[in-house]
Amino acid sequence: MAFYIFFFGLVLSVSLSVVIASDHSPLQDFCVADTRSRVLVNGLACKDPKTVEAADFSFFGLHLEGNTSNPIGSSVTPVTVFQLPGLNTLGISLVRIDYAPSGVNPPHTHPRASEIITVLEGSLEVGFVTSSPENRHITKVLQKGDVFVFPIGLVHYQRNVGSGHAVAIVALSSQNPGVVIIASAVFGSKPSIANDILVKAFHVDKGVINYLHSIF
């Protein structure tokens, strides 16, 4: 009997831990972000509901074309909690991405969100890589109206494979999905990752690593 009591107590404690570890449901209609608050919380503090206005729930400019005149040939227009305070605690955000011909959204991850992309104009090659040890590359060419999903945390990318400009709208499952651009994180970190570590990781000589550090 003592064993069964212990066993069910263990199962109950594990179950409660799982529940507590998940995101809580909102306890109010909304929690518009107060970007001026100095209170440190996991997210952003709420404005006084009495001071909330329609502008807190709206964003202007997603119809505007982004400037793709840069080395990667793409431009990201985010609509996260930092641009749209009304997203606070709602667990969603939106992004517009513009691509010049042959432009790319380079390999990156979102540590806090899954992503679903819809092509509005043009043709995009998209892909993601599964976790080690398989490192399987899953890729597809999307046309206008096509949709593709990138699972949370996995390295993924897009490339414009059409002859003209391409546009996509992306939805993410976090108000603040975060982004880690692989090349910039590895070769542009401050302070830098030690050269000998990167030489061994990438199987190249120190001169290549120094060059990559210099451009990031």
Image (cartoon, helix red, strand yellow):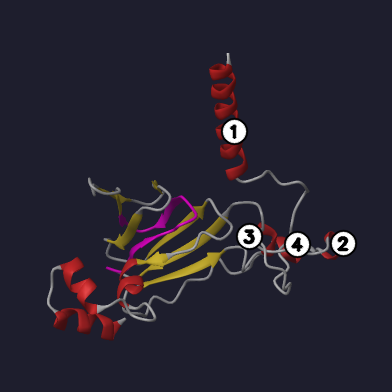
User: Do residues under tags 2 and 1 come within 8 Å of each other at their CB atoms?
Assistant: no
**Residue under label 2:** 50
Q: Which-is-in-front pick, marks 1 and 3?
A: 1
**Residue under label 1:** 13
Quadrant that contains the N terminus: top right
**Residue under label 4:** 46
Q: Earlier in the sequence, mark 2 or mark 1?
A: 1
Q: Earlier in the sequence, mark 1 or mark 3?
A: 1
Q: As shown in the figure, which amino acid type bears the numbered disc 4?
A: Cys
72 left or right of 98?
left
The prevailing secondary structure element of the residues shown in magenta is strand
Part of the protein shown in magenta: 102-126
Q: Residues within 10 Å of mark 1 (few under 14, many from 20)?
A: few
Residue 47 found in image quarter: bottom right
What is the spatial separation of the Cα atoms under label 4 and label 3, in whole angstroms?
Answer: 12 Å
Name the residue: 74% across, 57% down. Answer: 31
What is the spatial separation of the Cα atoms under label 2 and label 3, in whole angstroms?
Answer: 23 Å
User: Do residues under tags 2 and 3 come within 8 Å of each other at their CB atoms?
Assistant: no
Number of marks: 4
Q: As shown in the figure, which amino acid type bears the numbered disc 2?
A: Lys
Q: Position of residue 158 (x, y in %)?
A: 33, 59
Name the residue: 49% across, 63% down. Answer: 178
Q: Residues within 10 Å of mark 2 (few under 14, many from 20)?
A: few
Q: Does residue 211 sit above or below 40 in this rendering?
A: below
Residue 109 on the magenta segment: yes
Q: As shown in the figure, which amino acid type bears the numbered disc 3?
A: Asn
Q: Which-is-in-front pick, marks 4 and 1?
A: 1
Q: Residues within 10 Å of mark 3 (few under 14, many from 20)?
A: few
